[in-house]
Structures are given as C-alpha cells and as structure tokens.
Amino acid sequence: MQEVSEGVLEGPLTEQQVEERYGGAWIPVRRFGVWQSSSGKQKLRPIDDYSENKANLAFGYADKIALRALDQLVCSVRLWMQQVLADGKVAIELSDGSCLRGSIHPCWREEGRLLELAALDLRAAYKQFPLSPKSRALSVLVLKNPVSKEVACFEAKALPFGGTASVVHFNRAARLLWAIGQHLHVCWLNFFDDYPILTPRVLAGSTKQTLKALVDLLGFDCSWEKWQDFSTRATMLGVEVDLSDVASVGVRIRNKEGRAGQVVSTVEELLRKESMPARELLSVMGRIQFADAQVMGRTGRLALAEIRRWSRNHVDRVTVGRELMEAFGSLPTGSQVGRSQDSYVKGTSTSAIIRSLLVSYERIESNGASWPWFARVRRYCQGARGEARRVSMSHDRQGTL
C-alpha cells in the first residue's frame, strides 16, 4: 500500500469497478517479486509481468539505446591523461572531422591532472515518470489480499517496471538529463538510472554543486543518501573503478566486493544439481555474463554461448548433462572473476597478424595472468634481416606500455 500512498497506484478497486471504468476493455497484470542486492542489502523488487498478458508484444520501437558507459569512462580517462602528460599542446580530432588545438594551462599539468570519480543514481527511477492515461487500462495490477484472500485491482499511474515501453521512454528522459549536464561542461555518463561522474580533483566541489542544482531545477529525485564523495576509487555499474595509479599503471576495474564470490558459489551449486528450471538458468546466466564481461576473455564468452543455446530449448526444466557441465566448468574461477583488470592503452591493431596474436594472448589469460606488449624497434637497432616489430610477454600485470 506504500505505492498507493505515494500516488503511484490507485486502489484497491474491485473487478466490477474496473469493468465500469473501462467497459471491459482492460487487461490484468500479474506482479511477482525478485530478490536483489542493493548497497550490500537484499531487497524485494516488484516486477509487473507485461509479457504474460501480451502487452509487450503490442509495442514496437526503432530506437537503439547505446549503453557504453564503462567503455566511455575508460576512454575519457585515457584521453585526459594523454593530453595532460603530453608536451603541453592539445590536438583532438572531433566527430565532424575538424581538429581542436590549443595549449594546456600549467595548472592542469600539475594538481589539475588528478582525476576523481563518483556515482549518482535516480531514486525509484521509473516511478518518477507518469503513465499515459490512455495506457492505464493495460496496467491494472491484480493482487490477492493475504488476509481476506480476495482479489484486488490497482491502476498504475507511473511507468511500470516490466514493460518494454517503459525502458525506451525512461531512457529518453534519462539521456535528456545527461545531455543537459554535458552543456554545463560536466564530464558524466549515463547507464539507465546511473550516472558515473569524472572530474579533476580541483573541480570536485564545483561539479557536485552543479549537478545538485541541475537535478533540483529539473525536478529529478536522486538518492543523495547513497552519495560517496569524489575519490580515486569508486563503485559504479556493478564494478569498482580505481584511478589511484592511473598515470603509471592505468585504469583498474574489478567486480565489486562480494559479486565474484556470489557468481562462483552459484556456478558450483548448479554443477551439483541434475536439473534446474529454465528461468533459473537464465537468471544465473545474467549474473555470470555481467561478471564475465569484466574478465575480458574469450573463453567465458564461448561457454556462455553454449549455456544460452541450452536455455532456448523451450522446456520448463533443463537437464544438467555433460555438455552443460563442461560449459559451466570452463567459466572463469573465483580468482579470475575477482581480480583487477588493467585497461589496455590500445588493445587492437590495423594488422590482421597482430590482431590474431591478441586473440591468442586472450586465450592465455584463462590459464594465468599475462600482459602482452609490443615494441617498435628502430631500424638502426635491427640486424640485417631483423623484424620491424617484436612481440613480448610480461608476467607482471603492472607493466607499462
């Protein structure tokens, strides 16, 4: 009833009252709960099943949501450090093909080059946006009273969590907030309701004040009680990003505390079972995929492809046979999932041969920590028939490029 008092739901209504309101042209929606971890605590998140009542099938969209916040964060740090550590001149090629040139002020080459991070997220994000009155007939939640055992109806007045249309419409508003912040010269990124923020240490206080004024002016409700002040290390988007040694080592990224152990224990538990519900397999696969994306190897990707193929067999229960056990068994171990990952300065090449070598070294990553690096050898240092490039392997992950 908390959502009723907040104005998110209207009710309880009887089935007869809903019939009188919509003349029979309405669709019931089932709600179920999913346990999720948030800030180290378990909470029950209500999900409205718009797939079951076919409402999601009636919605189509042409928008493509680009969710590359973590990649963009690493690229932004890389670009900043490249410029401040250079010879004092800036040369940045813009998207329109032009080149931005200038000189770096001395203060940015000293304390100004130190970068810090923070994260801001919207509170009850979907519930901040109203549902069109024309769509409320398709959003009538039907719940059973645990005391009287009678069925009660609740009409949704805000974007429901579980509707495909909610995802698209919410992201339009979330991306609008991000775009306005960009015009205020705030270096921040957007991933659904999360906003990773990057700022020079000397501007940390100003950046926070600017963002607070912006969200208050536009009427967005943010979870300021979760705010952690700017620091060289911050947890965002489910991972921990470390910039403490960014000038000498680079950006370090690791799964946040507890996630690696949770993924490994879940896989070990599944390997002991003979079968599992298909829905449970999909849920576990989502956790593994999130963690494996941080590991940055190809082995886990191939294993996930096999597991995904099994989950699409359209059966209620999936038998854990030899092939599925091998797929789970080839996933990264706890040490691989939990360890910090250094960000490559480049990580690719225009040469097909070098790209194939990079893929080979990625496979080596599954057996132990390694760091491939490439050195250009000047012509006068080569022998008569020496190679122009040499490929070396360093077992020290803190090596430099």
Image: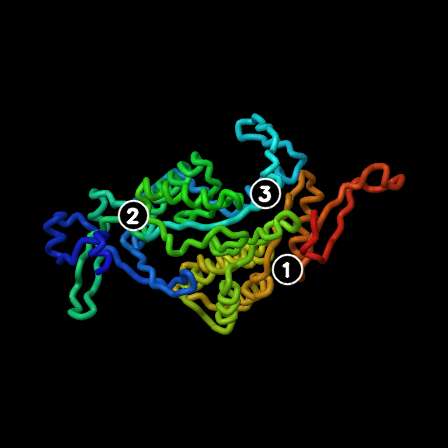
Give neighbour class at mark 1: few <14, some 14-19, many 20+ (Cα, 10 Å). Answer: many
Q: Are marks 1 and 2 in contact (CB under 8 Å)?
A: no
Can you tell which mark lies on residue 113?
3
Q: x, y (%) of residue 389?
A: 77, 42
Task: Determine the residue located farthest toward the right in the rendered image.
Answer: 384
Task: Determine the residue located farthest toward the top in the rendered image.
Answer: 98
Label 1 vs 2, first from the N-terminus: 2
Looking at the rendered structure, the secondary structure element under dot 1 is: loop
Residues under labels 1 and 2: Cα distance? 44 Å
Numbered disc in front, either 1 or 2: 2
Q: Amino acid at mark 3?
A: Arg
Examine the rendered structure and indicate whether residue 271 appears above or below residue 339. Answer: below
Q: Amino acid at mark 1?
A: Ser
Looking at the rendered structure, the secondary structure element under dot 3 is: helix
Can you tell which mark lies on residue 366?
1
Q: x, y (%) of residue 1?
A: 21, 60
Give neighbour class at mark 2: few <14, some 14-19, many 20+ (Cα, 10 Å). Answer: some
Q: Residue at x 67, y 48 (%)?
A: 358
